[in-house]
Image (tube, coloured by chain):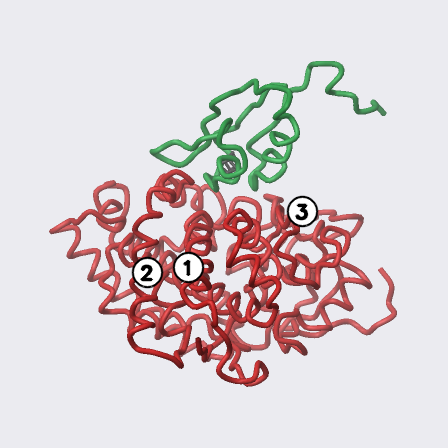
Chain colours: A green, B red
Protein backbone atom coordinates (compact mmCIF):
# COMPACT_ATOMS: atom_id res chain seq x y z
CA UNK A 1 0.00 0.00 0.00
CA UNK A 2 1.27 3.43 -0.97
CA UNK A 3 -0.36 6.68 0.15
CA UNK A 4 -0.63 9.57 -2.26
CA UNK A 5 -1.63 13.12 -1.35
CA UNK A 6 -2.93 15.81 -3.66
CA UNK A 7 -1.75 19.05 -2.05
CA UNK A 8 -3.91 21.13 -4.35
CA UNK A 9 -7.01 19.53 -2.89
CA UNK A 10 -5.90 19.36 0.74
CA UNK A 11 -7.73 21.92 2.91
CA UNK A 12 -5.60 21.38 6.00
CA UNK A 13 -8.44 20.12 8.17
CA UNK A 14 -6.06 17.75 9.95
CA UNK A 15 -8.33 14.72 10.11
CA UNK A 16 -5.44 12.60 8.86
CA UNK A 17 -2.96 13.87 11.46
CA UNK A 18 -5.59 13.43 14.15
CA UNK A 19 -6.43 9.88 13.13
CA UNK A 20 -2.95 8.55 12.48
CA UNK A 21 -0.15 10.83 13.69
CA UNK A 22 2.50 8.17 13.00
CA UNK A 23 1.80 8.49 9.29
CA UNK A 24 0.41 12.01 8.73
CA UNK A 25 1.55 15.43 9.82
CA UNK A 26 0.72 18.93 8.62
CA UNK A 27 2.99 21.62 7.26
CA UNK A 28 3.79 24.51 9.58
CA UNK A 29 3.24 26.97 6.72
CA UNK A 30 -0.14 26.19 5.31
CA UNK A 31 -1.38 23.17 7.25
CA UNK A 32 -1.40 20.89 4.22
CA UNK A 33 -0.69 17.23 4.72
CA UNK A 34 2.82 15.87 5.07
CA UNK A 35 3.12 12.14 4.73
CA UNK A 36 5.70 10.86 7.18
CA UNK A 37 5.50 7.28 6.04
CA UNK A 38 4.17 6.82 2.49
CA UNK A 39 4.37 3.04 2.75
CA UNK A 40 3.15 2.23 6.24
CA UNK A 41 3.40 -1.29 7.64
CA UNK A 42 0.57 -3.71 6.99
CA UNK A 43 -0.74 -3.58 10.56
CA UNK A 44 -1.66 0.07 10.01
CA UNK A 45 -3.62 -0.66 6.84
CA UNK A 46 -7.06 -0.41 8.45
CA UNK A 47 -6.20 2.84 10.21
CA UNK A 48 -4.75 4.27 6.99
CA UNK A 49 -7.95 3.43 5.15
CA UNK A 50 -9.95 5.12 7.87
CA UNK A 51 -7.81 8.27 7.60
CA UNK A 52 -8.23 8.32 3.83
CA UNK A 53 -11.98 7.91 4.23
CA UNK A 54 -12.23 10.68 6.82
CA UNK A 55 -10.29 13.22 4.74
CA UNK A 56 -12.92 15.82 3.86
CA UNK A 57 -11.40 17.04 0.61
CA UNK A 58 -10.56 13.75 -1.08
CA UNK A 59 -6.87 14.70 -1.05
CA UNK A 60 -5.66 11.27 0.02
CA UNK A 61 -5.66 8.13 -2.06
CA UNK A 62 -4.22 4.66 -1.82
CA UNK A 63 -2.24 2.93 -4.48
CA UNK A 64 -2.75 -0.75 -3.82
CA UNK A 65 -0.80 -2.43 -6.57
CA UNK A 66 -0.28 -5.44 -4.36
CA UNK A 67 -2.71 -8.01 -5.80
CA UNK A 68 -3.73 -9.32 -2.40
CA UNK A 69 -4.74 -5.85 -1.31
CA UNK A 70 -6.69 -4.86 -4.39
CA UNK A 71 -8.96 -7.84 -4.03
CA UNK A 72 -12.04 -5.99 -5.17
CA UNK A 73 -13.79 -7.76 -8.03
CA UNK A 74 -13.47 -6.16 -11.43
CA UNK A 75 -16.82 -5.63 -13.08
CA UNK B 1 -39.48 9.11 -3.87
CA UNK B 2 -42.85 8.38 -2.28
CA UNK B 3 -45.51 11.06 -2.24
CA UNK B 4 -47.07 9.74 0.97
CA UNK B 5 -46.71 12.97 2.94
CA UNK B 6 -47.28 16.37 1.42
CA UNK B 7 -44.22 18.36 0.44
CA UNK B 8 -42.49 20.07 3.32
CA UNK B 9 -42.74 23.82 3.26
CA UNK B 10 -40.00 25.70 5.12
CA UNK B 11 -37.33 24.03 7.26
CA UNK B 12 -38.73 23.04 10.70
CA UNK B 13 -36.85 24.44 13.71
CA UNK B 14 -39.11 23.64 16.68
CA UNK B 15 -37.91 20.65 18.70
CA UNK B 16 -40.26 18.37 20.62
CA UNK B 17 -37.43 17.19 22.88
CA UNK B 18 -34.44 19.23 24.06
CA UNK B 19 -31.68 17.12 22.55
CA UNK B 20 -33.38 15.66 19.49
CA UNK B 21 -33.81 17.23 16.07
CA UNK B 22 -37.40 18.13 15.14
CA UNK B 23 -39.51 14.97 14.68
CA UNK B 24 -40.57 16.21 11.26
CA UNK B 25 -36.97 15.86 10.05
CA UNK B 26 -36.63 12.35 11.45
CA UNK B 27 -39.88 11.35 9.76
CA UNK B 28 -38.74 12.85 6.48
CA UNK B 29 -35.43 10.99 6.70
CA UNK B 30 -37.23 7.65 7.02
CA UNK B 31 -39.43 8.54 4.07
CA UNK B 32 -36.80 9.92 1.67
CA UNK B 33 -33.37 11.13 2.80
CA UNK B 34 -33.27 13.66 -0.05
CA UNK B 35 -36.62 15.18 -0.86
CA UNK B 36 -38.31 18.26 -2.23
CA UNK B 37 -38.85 21.23 0.05
CA UNK B 38 -40.44 24.61 -0.58
CA UNK B 39 -38.17 27.52 0.34
CA UNK B 40 -39.01 30.84 1.99
CA UNK B 41 -38.79 32.66 -1.33
CA UNK B 42 -40.98 30.15 -3.17
CA UNK B 43 -38.05 28.21 -4.62
CA UNK B 44 -38.65 24.49 -5.09
CA UNK B 45 -35.48 23.11 -3.57
CA UNK B 46 -34.38 20.13 -1.52
CA UNK B 47 -34.01 18.90 2.03
CA UNK B 48 -31.26 16.39 2.83
CA UNK B 49 -31.58 14.43 6.07
CA UNK B 50 -29.68 11.22 5.25
CA UNK B 51 -26.05 10.69 6.23
CA UNK B 52 -24.80 9.35 2.89
CA UNK B 53 -26.66 12.01 0.89
CA UNK B 54 -25.44 14.85 3.11
CA UNK B 55 -21.85 13.66 2.98
CA UNK B 56 -21.97 13.28 -0.78
CA UNK B 57 -23.38 16.79 -1.24
CA UNK B 58 -20.77 18.38 1.05
CA UNK B 59 -17.94 16.61 -0.77
CA UNK B 60 -19.12 17.55 -4.25
CA UNK B 61 -17.52 20.58 -5.90
CA UNK B 62 -20.56 20.93 -8.17
CA UNK B 63 -22.41 22.34 -5.16
CA UNK B 64 -21.66 25.99 -4.41
CA UNK B 65 -21.59 27.84 -1.08
CA UNK B 66 -22.09 31.28 -2.60
CA UNK B 67 -24.91 33.22 -0.96
CA UNK B 68 -26.00 35.00 -4.12
CA UNK B 69 -26.96 31.62 -5.63
CA UNK B 70 -28.65 30.39 -2.50
CA UNK B 71 -32.32 30.34 -1.60
CA UNK B 72 -33.39 30.62 2.01
CA UNK B 73 -35.02 27.61 3.63
CA UNK B 74 -36.60 29.95 6.17
CA UNK B 75 -39.14 32.70 5.57
CA UNK B 76 -36.78 35.33 7.01
CA UNK B 77 -33.26 36.21 5.93
CA UNK B 78 -34.10 35.83 2.27
CA UNK B 79 -32.56 39.12 1.21
CA UNK B 80 -29.62 38.76 3.51
CA UNK B 81 -28.58 35.45 2.10
CA UNK B 82 -28.46 36.95 -1.33
CA UNK B 83 -26.76 40.13 -0.16
CA UNK B 84 -23.14 41.03 -0.81
CA UNK B 85 -20.55 39.22 1.22
CA UNK B 86 -17.95 41.02 3.32
CA UNK B 87 -14.55 40.52 1.69
CA UNK B 88 -12.59 37.72 3.36
CA UNK B 89 -15.68 35.87 4.64
CA UNK B 90 -14.54 32.65 3.01
CA UNK B 91 -17.17 30.38 4.59
CA UNK B 92 -19.47 31.39 1.77
CA UNK B 93 -17.00 31.28 -1.12
CA UNK B 94 -16.07 28.64 -3.65
CA UNK B 95 -12.57 27.84 -4.91
CA UNK B 96 -10.32 29.53 -5.89
CA UNK B 97 -11.31 32.45 -3.59
CA UNK B 98 -12.06 30.13 -0.68
CA UNK B 99 -8.75 28.36 -1.13
CA UNK B 100 -6.77 31.57 -1.16
CA UNK B 101 -8.12 32.79 2.18
CA UNK B 102 -8.27 29.43 3.90
CA UNK B 103 -4.68 28.57 2.99
CA UNK B 104 -3.46 31.66 4.81
CA UNK B 105 -4.95 30.28 8.03
CA UNK B 106 -4.67 26.51 7.96
CA UNK B 107 -1.08 26.55 9.21
CA UNK B 108 -2.33 28.21 12.41
CA UNK B 109 -4.90 25.50 13.19
CA UNK B 110 -2.99 22.28 12.67
CA UNK B 111 -3.28 19.35 15.06
CA UNK B 112 0.26 20.05 16.29
CA UNK B 113 -0.33 23.79 16.85
CA UNK B 114 -3.45 23.07 18.82
CA UNK B 115 -1.58 20.57 20.98
CA UNK B 116 0.88 23.32 21.84
CA UNK B 117 -2.03 25.41 23.11
CA UNK B 118 -3.12 22.74 25.60
CA UNK B 119 -1.27 24.15 28.64
CA UNK B 120 -2.70 27.61 28.05
CA UNK B 121 -6.25 26.28 27.61
CA UNK B 122 -5.79 24.21 30.73
CA UNK B 123 -4.77 27.37 32.69
CA UNK B 124 -7.72 29.35 31.37
CA UNK B 125 -10.08 26.51 32.33
CA UNK B 126 -8.67 26.19 35.85
CA UNK B 127 -8.89 29.92 36.48
CA UNK B 128 -12.54 29.93 35.40
CA UNK B 129 -13.23 27.03 37.77
CA UNK B 130 -11.44 28.90 40.58
CA UNK B 131 -13.64 31.91 39.94
CA UNK B 132 -16.77 29.74 40.03
CA UNK B 133 -15.68 28.28 43.33
CA UNK B 134 -14.97 31.70 44.80
CA UNK B 135 -18.30 33.11 43.68
CA UNK B 136 -20.16 30.04 44.95
CA UNK B 137 -23.29 28.19 43.85
CA UNK B 138 -25.65 28.64 42.17
CA UNK B 139 -23.97 29.75 38.96
CA UNK B 140 -24.95 30.17 35.34
CA UNK B 141 -22.59 27.76 33.65
CA UNK B 142 -22.85 29.61 30.34
CA UNK B 143 -21.69 32.92 31.77
CA UNK B 144 -19.11 31.51 34.16
CA UNK B 145 -17.61 28.72 32.11
CA UNK B 146 -18.94 27.75 28.68
CA UNK B 147 -18.73 31.18 27.08
CA UNK B 148 -15.57 32.63 28.70
CA UNK B 149 -13.25 29.72 27.88
CA UNK B 150 -13.54 29.72 24.09
CA UNK B 151 -13.90 33.51 24.04
CA UNK B 152 -10.66 33.98 25.95
CA UNK B 153 -8.87 31.48 23.73
CA UNK B 154 -9.98 32.95 20.42
CA UNK B 155 -9.34 36.52 21.64
CA UNK B 156 -5.77 35.61 22.53
CA UNK B 157 -5.22 33.83 19.24
CA UNK B 158 -6.64 36.62 17.09
CA UNK B 159 -5.37 39.49 19.21
CA UNK B 160 -8.85 40.84 20.03
CA UNK B 161 -9.07 42.47 23.49
CA UNK B 162 -11.24 40.29 25.75
CA UNK B 163 -12.49 43.50 27.44
CA UNK B 164 -14.49 44.13 24.26
CA UNK B 165 -16.38 40.85 24.62
CA UNK B 166 -19.77 42.43 25.32
CA UNK B 167 -19.69 44.05 21.93
CA UNK B 168 -18.70 41.02 19.90
CA UNK B 169 -20.79 38.55 21.89
CA UNK B 170 -23.84 40.74 21.41
CA UNK B 171 -23.24 41.37 17.70
CA UNK B 172 -22.56 37.74 16.95
CA UNK B 173 -25.70 36.57 18.75
CA UNK B 174 -27.74 38.95 16.56
CA UNK B 175 -25.98 37.69 13.42
CA UNK B 176 -26.89 34.10 14.35
CA UNK B 177 -30.47 34.90 15.38
CA UNK B 178 -32.72 33.26 12.80
CA UNK B 179 -35.55 35.61 13.73
CA UNK B 180 -33.61 38.87 13.54
CA UNK B 181 -34.55 41.16 10.67
CA UNK B 182 -32.24 41.76 7.73
CA UNK B 183 -31.63 45.31 8.98
CA UNK B 184 -30.70 44.12 12.46
CA UNK B 185 -28.31 41.52 11.13
CA UNK B 186 -26.71 43.90 8.66
CA UNK B 187 -26.26 46.51 11.39
CA UNK B 188 -24.65 44.01 13.77
CA UNK B 189 -22.37 42.70 11.04
CA UNK B 190 -21.30 46.17 9.95
CA UNK B 191 -20.70 47.18 13.55
CA UNK B 192 -18.46 44.18 14.14
CA UNK B 193 -16.67 44.67 10.82
CA UNK B 194 -15.99 48.33 11.66
CA UNK B 195 -14.65 47.31 15.06
CA UNK B 196 -12.38 44.65 13.57
CA UNK B 197 -11.34 46.99 10.75
CA UNK B 198 -10.12 49.58 13.26
CA UNK B 199 -8.31 46.87 15.20
CA UNK B 200 -6.59 45.60 12.05
CA UNK B 201 -5.52 49.12 11.06
CA UNK B 202 -3.97 49.58 14.51
CA UNK B 203 -2.16 46.25 14.21
CA UNK B 204 -0.77 47.19 10.85
CA UNK B 205 0.99 50.11 12.51
CA UNK B 206 1.89 48.32 15.70
CA UNK B 207 1.77 44.56 15.18
CA UNK B 208 1.59 42.09 18.06
CA UNK B 209 2.21 38.37 18.24
CA UNK B 210 -1.26 37.33 17.12
CA UNK B 211 -3.13 36.08 14.08
CA UNK B 212 -4.62 39.36 12.87
CA UNK B 213 -1.14 40.97 13.03
CA UNK B 214 0.24 37.97 11.19
CA UNK B 215 -2.31 38.44 8.41
CA UNK B 216 -1.36 42.10 7.99
CA UNK B 217 2.25 41.01 7.62
CA UNK B 218 1.40 38.51 4.88
CA UNK B 219 1.21 41.48 2.50
CA UNK B 220 -1.53 39.75 0.50
CA UNK B 221 -4.63 41.15 2.14
CA UNK B 222 -6.42 44.46 2.56
CA UNK B 223 -7.62 45.55 6.00
CA UNK B 224 -11.21 44.89 4.92
CA UNK B 225 -10.34 41.32 3.93
CA UNK B 226 -8.62 40.69 7.25
CA UNK B 227 -11.61 42.12 9.10
CA UNK B 228 -13.91 39.75 7.17
CA UNK B 229 -11.72 36.77 8.03
CA UNK B 230 -11.60 37.99 11.64
CA UNK B 231 -15.40 38.20 11.72
CA UNK B 232 -15.68 34.59 10.67
CA UNK B 233 -13.01 33.36 13.10
CA UNK B 234 -14.34 35.34 16.02
CA UNK B 235 -17.94 34.19 15.63
CA UNK B 236 -17.08 30.60 14.78
CA UNK B 237 -14.38 30.51 17.44
CA UNK B 238 -16.51 31.33 20.44
CA UNK B 239 -20.19 30.64 19.70
CA UNK B 240 -19.81 27.06 18.60
CA UNK B 241 -17.57 25.70 21.35
CA UNK B 242 -19.45 27.73 23.98
CA UNK B 243 -22.69 26.07 22.96
CA UNK B 244 -21.11 22.64 22.84
CA UNK B 245 -19.82 23.13 26.38
CA UNK B 246 -23.16 24.43 27.68
CA UNK B 247 -25.45 21.99 25.89
CA UNK B 248 -23.00 19.11 26.36
CA UNK B 249 -22.87 19.64 30.12
CA UNK B 250 -26.68 19.77 30.19
CA UNK B 251 -26.85 16.49 28.26
CA UNK B 252 -24.37 14.84 30.62
CA UNK B 253 -26.22 16.10 33.71
CA UNK B 254 -29.35 14.41 32.46
CA UNK B 255 -27.40 11.20 31.66
CA UNK B 256 -25.52 10.48 34.90
CA UNK B 257 -24.02 7.19 33.70
CA UNK B 258 -22.49 8.91 30.68
CA UNK B 259 -21.34 11.77 32.87
CA UNK B 260 -19.51 9.37 35.16
CA UNK B 261 -17.56 7.94 32.22
CA UNK B 262 -16.38 11.40 31.11
CA UNK B 263 -15.48 12.36 34.69
CA UNK B 264 -13.73 9.16 35.72
CA UNK B 265 -12.08 7.70 32.63
CA UNK B 266 -9.49 9.96 31.00
CA UNK B 267 -9.12 7.41 28.20
CA UNK B 268 -12.76 7.83 27.25
CA UNK B 269 -12.75 11.60 26.82
CA UNK B 270 -11.60 11.80 23.19
CA UNK B 271 -14.35 9.52 22.08
CA UNK B 272 -16.93 11.16 24.34
CA UNK B 273 -16.25 14.51 22.71
CA UNK B 274 -16.88 13.05 19.23
CA UNK B 275 -20.10 11.46 20.45
CA UNK B 276 -21.31 14.70 22.03
CA UNK B 277 -20.54 16.46 18.75
CA UNK B 278 -22.56 13.87 16.87
CA UNK B 279 -25.45 13.60 19.29
CA UNK B 280 -25.90 17.33 19.82
CA UNK B 281 -25.17 18.54 16.25
CA UNK B 282 -25.52 22.17 17.34
CA UNK B 283 -25.88 23.63 13.86
CA UNK B 284 -29.63 24.12 13.98
CA UNK B 285 -30.15 24.42 10.23
CA UNK B 286 -28.05 23.83 7.16
CA UNK B 287 -25.60 24.29 5.65
CA UNK B 288 -27.26 25.07 2.32
CA UNK B 289 -25.60 24.43 -1.04
CA UNK B 290 -26.70 25.23 -4.57
CA UNK B 291 -26.09 22.98 -7.57
CA UNK B 292 -23.95 24.62 -10.28
CA UNK B 293 -24.93 21.89 -12.73
CA UNK B 294 -27.25 18.89 -12.72
CA UNK B 295 -26.03 16.42 -10.09
CA UNK B 296 -27.30 12.97 -9.25
CA UNK B 297 -27.22 12.11 -5.56
CA UNK B 298 -28.17 8.56 -4.67
CA UNK B 299 -30.43 8.24 -7.70
CA UNK B 300 -32.12 11.64 -7.27
CA UNK B 301 -31.45 14.37 -9.77
CA UNK B 302 -30.80 17.84 -8.37
CA UNK B 303 -30.92 20.36 -11.19
CA UNK B 304 -28.58 23.28 -11.74
CA UNK B 305 -29.71 26.29 -9.71
CA UNK B 306 -31.59 24.27 -7.09
CA UNK B 307 -30.65 24.69 -3.43
CA UNK B 308 -30.28 21.82 -0.97
CA UNK B 309 -30.54 22.46 2.76
CA UNK B 310 -29.04 19.85 5.05
CA UNK B 311 -29.98 18.87 8.55
CA UNK B 312 -26.74 17.71 10.13
CA UNK B 313 -28.72 16.74 13.22
CA UNK B 314 -30.86 14.31 11.25
CA UNK B 315 -27.88 13.04 9.21
CA UNK B 316 -25.82 12.38 12.34
CA UNK B 317 -28.59 10.16 13.68
CA UNK B 318 -29.25 8.28 10.47
CA UNK B 319 -29.71 4.64 11.57
CA UNK B 320 -28.01 3.54 8.34
CA UNK B 321 -24.78 5.05 9.68
CA UNK B 322 -25.11 5.21 13.49
CA UNK B 323 -27.04 2.40 15.10
CA UNK B 324 -29.28 3.61 17.90
CA UNK B 325 -28.26 7.13 16.95
CA UNK B 326 -30.91 8.77 19.11
CA UNK B 327 -29.11 7.56 22.23
CA UNK B 328 -26.11 9.35 23.72
CA UNK B 329 -23.44 6.69 24.16
CA UNK B 330 -20.01 8.15 24.87
CA UNK B 331 -18.37 4.79 24.33
CA UNK B 332 -19.56 4.33 20.74
CA UNK B 333 -17.35 5.21 17.80
CA UNK B 334 -18.80 8.46 16.50
CA UNK B 335 -16.01 8.94 13.99
CA UNK B 336 -17.27 10.19 10.66
CA UNK B 337 -19.97 12.45 12.15
CA UNK B 338 -20.74 15.54 10.12
CA UNK B 339 -20.86 18.10 12.92
CA UNK B 340 -17.79 19.90 11.58
CA UNK B 341 -19.12 19.54 8.06
CA UNK B 342 -17.33 17.69 5.29
CA UNK B 343 -15.66 18.68 2.04
CA UNK B 344 -13.51 21.74 1.51
CA UNK B 345 -15.37 23.84 4.08
CA UNK B 346 -14.92 21.35 6.91
CA UNK B 347 -14.38 23.38 10.05
CA UNK B 348 -11.00 25.09 10.10
CA UNK B 349 -11.09 25.37 13.89
CA UNK B 350 -12.13 21.81 14.63
CA UNK B 351 -8.85 20.79 16.20
CA UNK B 352 -9.04 23.80 18.51
CA UNK B 353 -12.62 22.96 19.45
CA UNK B 354 -11.60 19.38 20.22
CA UNK B 355 -8.74 20.45 22.47
CA UNK B 356 -11.00 22.92 24.32
CA UNK B 357 -13.70 20.32 24.91
CA UNK B 358 -11.31 17.54 25.85
CA UNK B 359 -9.90 19.78 28.55
CA UNK B 360 -13.02 21.61 29.72
CA UNK B 361 -15.61 18.83 30.24
CA UNK B 362 -13.54 16.57 32.51
CA UNK B 363 -12.00 19.53 34.39
CA UNK B 364 -15.47 20.82 35.24
CA UNK B 365 -16.83 17.44 36.28
CA UNK B 366 -13.80 16.68 38.43
CA UNK B 367 -13.74 20.05 40.16
CA UNK B 368 -17.44 19.77 41.04
CA UNK B 369 -18.29 16.08 41.44
CA UNK B 370 -21.68 17.10 42.84
CA UNK B 371 -22.54 19.28 39.84
CA UNK B 372 -26.29 19.31 39.20
CA UNK B 373 -29.02 21.43 37.65
CA UNK B 374 -30.43 24.17 39.87
CA UNK B 375 -33.77 24.08 38.04
CA UNK B 376 -35.88 21.28 36.53
CA UNK B 377 -34.53 20.35 33.08
CA UNK B 378 -37.64 21.63 31.31
CA UNK B 379 -37.01 25.09 32.73
CA UNK B 380 -33.58 25.50 31.13
CA UNK B 381 -33.99 28.21 28.48
CA UNK B 382 -32.94 27.00 25.02
CA UNK B 383 -31.57 28.89 22.02
CA UNK B 384 -34.52 27.77 19.93
CA UNK B 385 -34.15 30.41 17.21
CA UNK B 386 -30.39 30.66 16.85
CA UNK B 387 -28.44 29.18 13.96
CA UNK B 388 -26.29 27.59 16.67
CA UNK B 389 -28.42 25.62 19.11
CA UNK B 390 -27.66 25.44 22.81
CA UNK B 391 -28.71 26.70 26.23
CA UNK B 392 -29.19 30.39 26.95
CA UNK B 393 -28.41 29.82 30.60
CA UNK B 394 -27.60 26.72 32.58
CA UNK B 395 -28.24 27.25 36.30
CA UNK B 396 -26.12 24.78 38.29
CA UNK B 397 -25.34 23.88 41.91
CA UNK B 398 -22.57 21.74 43.37
S1 LIG C 1 -7.42 15.14 6.20
FE1 LIG C 1 -7.24 15.58 4.01
S2 LIG C 1 -7.63 17.75 3.84
FE2 LIG C 1 -7.20 17.35 5.98
S3 LIG C 1 -5.01 17.74 6.21
FE3 LIG C 1 -5.26 15.58 5.83
S4 LIG C 1 -5.07 15.39 3.60
FE4 LIG C 1 -5.42 17.54 4.01
Which numbered disc flags the more N-terminal residue, 2 or 3? 3
What numbered label is drawn on residue B11? none
Contact (Cβ within 8 Å) of mark 1 with mark 2: yes
Q: Which residue is mark 3?
A: B56
Q: Nearer the viewer, residue B338 or B129?
A: B129
User: Does the rendering let one see residue B55?
Assistant: yes
Mark 3 falls within which chain? B
- For the point 41% across and 73% down, which residue is it? B142
Q: Nearer the viewer, residue B207 or B330?
A: B330
**Rendered-image quadrant of the N terminus of chain B:** bottom right
Is disc 1 surrounded by few (<14), some (14 to 19) or many (20+) residues within 10 Å?
some
Q: Which residue is mark 1?
A: B363
| Residue B171 coordinates in the image, percent (x, y) | 35, 73
Residue placed furthest toward the left: B206
Residue B80 falls left or right of residue B251? left
3D distance between C-alphas at marks 3 and 1:
37 Å
Amino acid sequence: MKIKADLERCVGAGMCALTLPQVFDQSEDDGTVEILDPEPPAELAAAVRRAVQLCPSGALSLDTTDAAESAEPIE
Amino acid sequence: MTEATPRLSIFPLARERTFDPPDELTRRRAEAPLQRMMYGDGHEGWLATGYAESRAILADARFSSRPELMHSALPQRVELRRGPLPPGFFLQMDPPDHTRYRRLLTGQFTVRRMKQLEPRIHDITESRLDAMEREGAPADLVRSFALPIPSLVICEMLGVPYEDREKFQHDSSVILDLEASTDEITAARDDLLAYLGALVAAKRKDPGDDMLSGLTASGELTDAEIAGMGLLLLIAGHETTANMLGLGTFALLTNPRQLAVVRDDPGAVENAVEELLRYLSILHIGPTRTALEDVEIGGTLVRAGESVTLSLGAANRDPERFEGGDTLDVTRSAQGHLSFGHGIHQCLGQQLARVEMRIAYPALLRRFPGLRLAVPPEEVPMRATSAVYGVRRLPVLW
